[in-house]
Image (cartoon, helix red, strand yellow):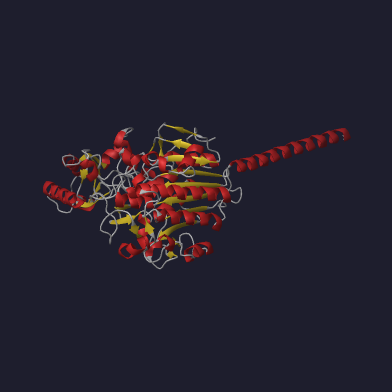
Amino acid sequence: MRLFLSLFLILLLFNCKAQNNIIESKVEAILTQGNDRPKLVVGVVVDQMRYDYLTRFNNKFSEGGFKRLINEGFYCKNNHYNYVPTYTGPGHTSIYTGTTPKYHGIIGNNWYDKDIKETVYCAGDSTVQSVGTLSKAGQMSPHRMVSTTFADENRLFTQLQGKTIGVSLKDRGAILPAGHTANAAYWFNGRDEGSFISSTYYMSDLPKWVNDFNDSDAAEKYLKVWNTLYNIETYTESGTDLNDYESGFRGKETASFPYDLNALKTDNYGFDILKSTPYGNSIVADFAIAAIDGEQLGQDDIADVLTVSFSSTDYVGHNFGVNSKEIEDTYIRLDKDLERFLIALDAKIGKGNYTLFLTSDHGAVHVPAYLQSVKIPSGYIDSATFKNDVETFLTNRFEVPGLLENVSNNQIFLNKKLINDFKLDLKEIEEALVDELITFENIYKVYTANTMQTTSFTTGVEELLQNGYNQKRSGDVIMVYDPAVISYGKKGSTHGSALNYDTHVPLLFFGKGIKKGSTLTKTVITDIAPTMSALLGISFPNAATGKPLEFVID
């Protein structure tokens, strides 16, 4: 009996020791995995950055900005948006959710809400209040985005210990990437304030570091003369400075260098003028660097996320066009801001401790008037005339006035109540519109909502349309303009199409866990979030349709 008890105790001790060894091994594995995760993931979105800006302006870039990301990181040269419309709100959302408007619900910057019969803003939220301003500029939240971002998934994975901070000039550029669970999102309020603000969705008061930044009059120093960084004669990668294709600023007769911003501010909404200059990017870089310290990002082994959107590139592109001296100077100066941002990350987080990706929310088309001057097919659609023609057709064909409820984002919304009241056939009206609209000048393709819901497209513009079609929120008829045809003024440029000038954007990965190299293999924007999720070892965003880019991860 005594021998049996001795043997039992020996076996029990052996098993306990074995169990302890297993537990210790698991703990060690978890700690090791934690050490393999970056301390900080930084997502950088450059608003309206065409892919070819990286190659066109390459000789003007320093070694520490874009070139550093290319030379030390992984360069995806054939990266595209896989849906339409290519706008800021959907773009930022798709980057961080890993899916398209079909699933995340942000179908435009603004869209017509079929339920309340009003146009809504992608980040607008009247249920929250402004923080940091008395204006309504802070009444914003991500509530219209119905899926999670990878930043949300990181927060869930870390039991809300990993922080998420969003920063941008634009509210939507800060709010949508940061997701639903963000600690904070901050955006720039211009006019007569020139400060960063937030909303009660995140906080009741701005933290001290933000108030200190705003009180330092950080924006004031940028109200100065904007001239080219280098001799304008060396800007051979862009068109002539004085031409007929640029809007410029109120109060200045020509859209040409130099621009005295302090003198022009009164006629251009005060501090808002900075948005349409490279200095809007500079103040975002200033604020993002301050946020690293103020929020203590990347200071432990629990991964944080910082989303930064540089929006001035979009404002400058809309104002001056993609071939302007102004856009070239803006990217040369952004390269400098990017360089000092990377230096700050090296110093505050440590080289090899953070991971960064850089991409864009969409590209832009050359000014069609300029394209016409060099004999490339292009043109304009007058939206008011178009709407009137559609209304006339519907009234004449179906003998019921008011069938057209809204035209926006290249979509037509029909009045369902009238259709039901007069016992009309919705599908018949949709098909009649398709047959009529395809005869209009500069209309390239037209599809019904029924086609989007019943036909599976796997290639071409049709696939992109379907990925952007949200059954609950999109319209009854969807249109595609001819290439390089826009509904916009004849000076400056815009975006939104399924064409390469809008879909082809840069994608650079850099830092911890990233291989060095490049590829011409096609990647799509929805692959970014799953790749970041895989790197972090967390769940993919809940509606993600993209896939991890295995060749990027080391």
What is the x, y in percent for residue 456?
32, 34
Q: Quadrant of residue 28?
A: top right
Specify whether 439 is left or right of 257.
left
What residue lies at 67% left-to-right and 42% top-to-bottom? 27
Specify whether 143 is left or right of 238.
right
Please state the total of marks drawn on the protein image.
0
Front-most of residues 151 and 282 = 282
Front-most of residues 529 and 159 = 529
The residue positioned farthest toward the right in the image shown: 2
The residue positioned farthest toward the bottom in the image shown: 134
Front-most of residues 417 and 272 = 272
Q: Is residue 24 visible?
A: yes
Q: Is residue 47 visible?
A: no
Specify whether 261 is left or right of 73.
left
What is the x, y in percent for residue 275?
37, 56
What residue lies at 59% left-to-right and 47% top-to-bottom? 350
Residue 51 position (above or below residue 405): above
Residue 391 position (above or below residue 457): below
What is the x, y in percent for residue 202?
48, 59
Front-most of residues 547 and 68 = 68
User: Dividing the image into 4 quarters, which one contains the N terminus?
Assistant: top right
User: Dividing the image into 4 quarters, which one contains the C terminus?
Assistant: top right
What is the x, y in percent for residue 306?
50, 50
Q: Quadrant of residue 448?
A: top left
